[in-house]
Amino acid sequence: MKLRNTLPALLVVLTLPAQADRLPLPANPAYVEECGACHLAYPPQLLDAHSWLHVVNGLDRHFGSDASLDAGNNNARRAAIADFLGRNAGGRKTGVTADAKGQPLLRISETAWFRREHREVEPAVWKRPAIKSPANCAACHTRAADGDYSERSITIPK
Ligand code: HEC
Ligand code: HEC
């Protein structure tokens, strides 16, 4: 039966392009609560585990904000978030997310992967009032909250 052998292979090929623009967020209420309050709960797949550890260990000096976890048992909560990010971290998609000196990058928007995917976006576009920063994924990726980064869901604000 030829069909039996070719069909699974064909399905793999057909699903690949769809997966490239989909970054579903694995369920984790603590991560969404603590890391989705000021910005999108970024896809863990877009930094490697080393980078995430540095982000989580520096929350009191977080890109000019204090993002320390407040109230209660925050050491356990921070450890749980670090564990979640580590388990779901990238590497396969983004490669190692460090700078030329091997220091972990803390910004998805500074990784080689991000720059490559966004090379068609003119520098001035990032500065538009409705966008402000490359970190503002949802300004252009209108379905980013659902993990959908497909081309058809992109609208670049004027
Ligand atoms: C108090 C608000 C606040 C909280 C809470 C917060 N962040 Fe942020 N985060 C920021 C700000 C502000 C920036 C810089 C945004 C910019 O450059 O436009 C940022 C940027 C980032 C970036 C870099 C984005 C990029 O690629 O340029 C990462 C990664 C990040 N945050 C992860 C986290 C994680 C993980 C948590 C939860 C532990 C968290 N943030 C909680 C305010 C916050
Ligand atoms: C100024 C608008 C803008 C912002 C802000 C932005 N992107 Fe993009 N993004 C684009 C454009 C344009 C493309 C290229 C689309 C293409 O050529 O298919 C792209 C491509 C992508 C892709 C690849 C999609 C595919 O088809 O494989 C991913 C994933 C992605 N962006 C994630 C992010 C993340 C995560 C952030 C925030 C840290 C972000 N983007 C911020 C506009 C933006």
Image (tube, helix red, strand yellow):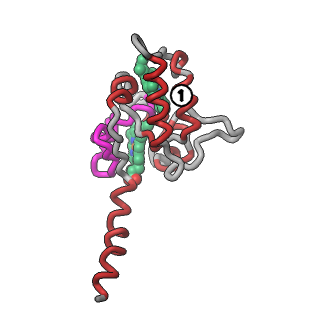
Residue 93 in picture, x, y percent from top left: 49, 51
Figure quadrant of the C terminus: top left
Q: Quadrant of ligand 1?
A: top left
Q: Residue at x 56, y 46 (%)?
A: 112
Label total for image:
1
Label 1 sits on a secondary structure element that is helix
Q: Is most of the magenta stretch helix, strand or loop? A: loop
What residue sits 69% from the left and 39% below the top?
102
Task: State the extent of the magenta-drawn residues as a range.
Answer: 133-158
Pick the residue in front: 128 or 28.
28
Three-letter code, disc 1: Val
Farthest top residue? 71
x and y percent of residue 147 in the render?
32, 43
- Is 49 a magenta residue? no
Q: Is residue 156 above or below residue 12?
A: above
Residue 158 visible in the current orientation: no
Q: Residue at x 33, y 74 (%)?
A: 8
How packed mark 1 is, by other alpha carbons closer than 10 Å (few <14, some 14-19, many 20 or more), is some
> If the image is split into quadrants, where does the N terminus sit?
bottom left
Q: Quadrant of residue 13?
A: bottom left
Residue 5, given in percent of the width and then of the height, sits at 34, 81
Residue 140 painted magenta: yes
Give the residue displayed 30% in from the left and 37% down from the top: 145
Assess mark 1: CB under 8 A from ligand 1? yes
Q: Can you name the residue that lies furthest to the right here?
A: 101
Residue 139 appears in which quarter of the rendering? top left
State left or right for residue 99 relative to residue 146. Answer: right
Q: Which residue is mark 1?
A: 55
Q: Is residue 6 visible?
A: yes
**Residue nearer the viewer, 74 or 61:** 74
